[in-house]
Image (cartoon, rainbow, N blue to C red):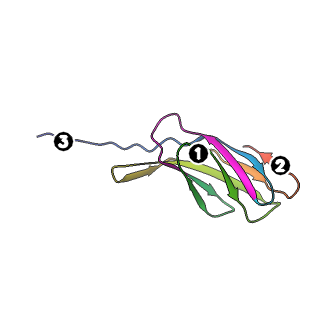
Amino acid sequence: MCFLVFVFLDPLPPRNVTFRDANSTYVKLSWFPPDDGLISKYNVYSQMVNETVVWVPGKIDVDILVPSSNTLYTFFVTSVSSGSNITTESVSSNEATGLTSKFCCLILNL
């Protein structure tokens, strides 16, 4: 008797998520893909915006509309791998935090 066993490992998280730019209506995030793994998409999460934005592989930066200026936002990104009817999501990346403003942007990369 022969058995075929598949082991699915969670993908690694994106690296170096960075709050790159902002104004009163958007923030720009960027990151590096994980060192290994087949990534089908990235999920971008925000504590203030309360939404998930999904992006395809190869896209390692994103502009996100934000509802308020002069607000501190924190974002993190996960990697998602899909195949054979199984989807797995990585642990969270580092957090990127920044303050939006109408006139300038204070960027805090933590």
The residue furthest top is 35
Q: Give amino acid for label 3.
A: Phe
In screen coordinates, is 68 left or right of 57?
A: right
Q: Give amino acid for label 1.
A: Lys
Q: Disc 1 versus disc 2: distance between alpha carbons?
A: 24 Å
> Which labelled disc corresponds to residue 106?
2
> Mark 3 falls on what kind of element?
loop
| N-terminal label among 3 and 2 | 3
Give me the residue at 66% from left, 48% from top. 95
Q: Crowding at label 3, few (<14), some or many (≥20) Cα neighbours within 10 Å? A: few
In screen coordinates, is 106 left or right of 59?
A: right
Give me the residue at 56% from left, 39% from top. 33
> Mark 1 falls on what kind of element?
loop
* Image x and y of residue 45, in percent: 61, 56
> Which labelled disc corresponds to residue 30?
none
Q: Is residue 30 magenta?
A: yes
> Which labelled disc corresponds to residue 3?
3
Count of numbered circles on the image = 3
The residue furthest right is 103
Q: Disc 1 versus disc 3: distance between alpha carbons?
A: 38 Å
